[in-house]
Amino acid sequence: FCHMLTSKSIHHNLSHESMDESTRAERYSRQIAAMGSDSVALLAEASVLLIGLGGAGAEIAKTLCLSGVHRLTVVDERENCLGMEHDFFCRTTKEGATVAQCAIPCLSQLNPWSAISEAKMKEAFEVHFICTFNAVVFSIFPGQQFLFGEAQRLDIICREHGVKFFLVEVAGIFGRCFADCGQNFSFSDGNGEKPAAAFLAGLSRTEEGNVLLHLSEEKKGGFQVGDEVIVKELTWRHADGHMEHPICAVGGLEVSAVMAHSLELLLSDEQKDLLSSVTEDKLFTGGIVKQVKNMETGSHLPLSEGCADRIRVQKSSSLDSTKLPDVPLIHYLLDLCAQRNDKSRHEDFVSLKAIQHIVLTKFPTLQSSGEHMRLVLEAYYGGAGILPPLTSVMGGLVGQEVLKGICRKYRPLDQWLVFDCREVLPELHVEPFNRLPRGTRFDSQAAVLGWGLTTLLRSRKLFVAGAGAIGCELLKLYAQIGVGTIENGALLVTDYDVVEMHNLSSQFLFTEGDIGKKKSRAAAHALVRRFEDVNVMPYEEKIGLSSEEAFNDEFFDSLNGISNGLDNVEARLHVDQKCIYYRKSFVDAGTYGMKGHVQAVVADLSENYANLSDAQEPSIPLCTLKYFPHSHEHTIQWAKNAFDNFFGVEVDELSAYIEKGRAFVVEGSRTGASKLSLIKTLRVNLSIIASASYSDCLRWGIVTFLRLFQANIAALLRRFPRNMVTSSGAPFWGGPKRRPSPLLLDLDNSEQRRFVILAARLRARSLGIHVNHSIENDLSSLAGSIDMELLNDSDVELGGIQGEVDIGRGSQAEVSEETIIEECRTLPDTRPVCGQLLPIFFGGEGKKEVHIDFVMAAANLRGKCYEIEASDRYTVQSVAEKITPALVTSTSVVSGLAVLEMIKVLQEKKLEFHRNSYFNLALPFFTSSMPSPPVSRYHGDHKWTVWSNIQINGDKDLTLREFLDAFKSKFGLSVSMISCGVSMVYSLFAPKRRISERLRMTMTRIAVEVGQVDGGELEMCVNCRNHMFCLMFRCSEGWKSEVVSVPAIFSIRSVCRRRYDR
């Protein structure tokens, strides 16, 4: 085996053994957030054999390399990248080189820790060779030498030796894939969701003797009938007593019914005995019910059996559920395309008429003309070509199935999945002569779409918003299909962000050499390096109001479409608003781990993005964060806030005091009680600066521990005693309010010691004090010198939470200005001489590992106080840095679907041809639907949507009176109010003299004098094509004074270039 590897071309820049763990964690942080660190570790030891780089093969190779597969061996013995000119990773390097040899250098650049090697086809059927791999992928595509029968034979070898087998096939507008994980396989986490959990508000018994769990209002959903759950942390006491009795955790419970606020559990006799204490005279408090995810099992048929028509129907799913009835036909048409590749059966490839006759005989319900016969034509003529967006979709799907098989995580495909993108085809059938090759890199695409549509795509100008994971894929696909490769065409891309290490696991256009560079420029450079004919124009603007000057009227007017690759809702909404304003279509794409969505927003035809926009992420209530945490998200966010406050905010305040003196405190905007707290903090920090001693930093670290985890907790328990009840008589502590316990100082405890030392080091660094590691071993003696009376100060008492807990206490007493001034006098009047102060905020300058270390130590100590499970490093980093789970597989799928929608947009297809898509690769689940039309508003015979505008025609610059008359004549509406920008132009309640003056003014003059539009702008645009002049207004109808909502007013004769928000 070792000899075999050394005899082939192997590209492996680094070994896993030499890989720095922090670099690995940073690079794969988004993937770890999606799949878990255990899965990423398994991939780092996995080996995959990929046979065929054509079709979806190269896309699968890309996803496996970026995902961190340890060894990838590729087989493709075609010479000179024949038929691969359009592919991003396959380029001819030397005469006579195979496709595999040409692709290996490009693939190896994606991940220095993946070994890429080549093998020969004859080796792929040797048992000792196959046994060295975890998975085998067989790619079938037009123009290859591989036969379908070879795939069946290879699958049998894989099944016999426990190797996962996957097949993918693309031809023209059709694609399908097949998964065989063996006769008996197991997997974990069947849906990719976090286990459902909820706090209990109480328990009761049903008439049948089962237990009914009453859920708190905080969380109700996520449970399903048949789920296994565990009930834990439950206590009970007699209704008239104070003695609490904990109940041990009870597992193996089955949910028999799910109601709005409760779950019914089906109990065995043994479980009934364990929960026999559920009686009416007992009061239950606390308690959590949590879903248990067990290993699941499955069984797959071999490919030889799975090819039977009956099995194909039973075991097939579709990316578009509306096309499920067509699955048998698509399978047959792909068999037809595969037959064309099989030279031994090429004589069986009969004429088109004969094939149509066979189809009608095999599928008697089909009509001899119409949509299905169009599919037969496309299989016959277009099946010899490849469509890049389709290969991206299928490559991402199969890549994810390979990862599932290796990691034994998430539900595998069962077993076939088919897809066709018939909607992208030109409306009229493409004649065979219009598909013939012309010796360009677009020959394969033209065989599918025809040269007419291919040329149209090449002349289009598209704007890609964002050059992140989705943006990179979009740019690659648009370049592959030729956007911006001839006159008037261009690819425009913007991204203000820079390349970081974690981008490299999902954003393949970037390499380590690009770290620190602007994403848009690095992506454009990589694109042009591969496709020299693409006209790429990079911008470095952030999508939003700040980019109005760069992305102006001329910019948007020149575009044929917009593709969103943005990672936040706010930027998406801005693009949505602009597209409505300029009546431009755009396609939005987004992913979250295994999930993805595509939304086509078609100008004038569909609803806009804002009408279906994503919900904003809910924030954690401040009261929960400060006093009543009940999850690791709460403790981690609390620890992150503490980091920023201790080492960032406090140091900034100290700098301000040193600069301004006592005036900073007295004249500041803080309230009285807050000013007292500021004075104490300044006093402590000034004392540390004065001594310039690291031992004082260590003492501060010890005192901080005592305050956070002992004194403040004790104060909370004094405020809300153990047996406290609410005004309704319910126990105060229970459900989401977990009763904490103070931690006793034990500097021999590794967690406590680590917190103190990390806090001291960060405090020293922020205050410019040298760190002396030698005295860190003498923490006990330093602790003995601390005045414990300092912990009894008022700042550990609680305030501001009465409204949250409804106990009727008064607010904190006001602090007089005299008291503030008196306390300020205790601060030193002279400005101390100190080292350079360095405010440290989480994720800012410095070693991020230290930031994570502190947050992890603080969060887990707080978790001990509240009996919340400790968080590992990956979890802390994910929550603290708000890492969005990302996988290159789901990115490939969503980008391919988005580009297919854009091809429809550029053809100005009707709405019924477009699809909004959603998928979850963990299940796997796919659904799509036609976009909804925009909501219509009516007034009389007039109909308006969000895309509508009103044009008032005239052969001159209208006066305001002429505008009002024309508007009333056309729509029967009287205008009651008009505003231009932020200025009121006209209103019925304005002084009559002003109204009379304005009515005689022209609209252009109003814009300059009232709306304060720059007059120079107006003069410059006199000779430009007509632009809209938008005014805000309200209309009243007759005597009813009814407010009528109408679109923007566009004056044809207006020469005002500037536009206004409606």
Image: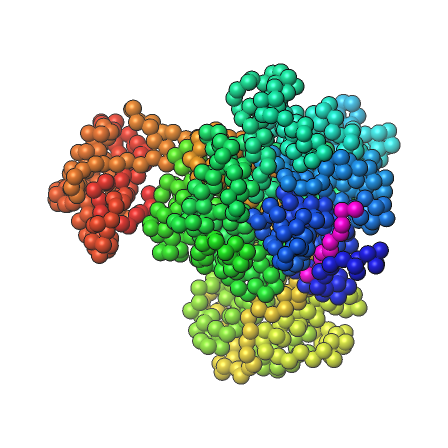
In this picture, residue 161 sits left or right of residue 138? right
Measuring 86% from the left and 48% from the top, which residue is drawn there? Answer: 128
Measuring 84% from the left and 55% from the top, which residue is drawn there? Answer: 1
> What residue span does the magenta drawing correspond to?
110-122
Q: As displayed, is residue 756 above or below residue 377?
A: below
Residue with the most extreme front position:
347
Q: As displayed, is residue 483 above or below residue 679?
A: above
Relative image position of residue 1013 (x, y in whole percent): 24, 53
The image quadrant that residue 997 belongs to is top left
In this picture, residue 433 sits left or right of residue 740? left
Does the magenta run of residues contain 118? yes
The image quadrant that residue 542 belongs to is bottom left
Q: Nearer the viewer, residue 58 or 798?
A: 58
Measuring 67% from the left and 55% from the top, which residue is drawn there? Answer: 97
Relative image position of residue 796 (x, y in whole percent): 62, 62
Q: Nearer the viewer, residue 735 or 1061?
A: 1061
Q: As displayed, is residue 7 above or below residue 148?
A: below
Does the magenta run of residues contain 18? no
The image quadrant that residue 367 belongs to is top right
Q: Nearer the viewer, residue 575 or 1010?
A: 575
Q: Nearer the viewer, residue 1027 or 259?
A: 1027
Relative image position of residue 836 (x, y in whole percent): 55, 79
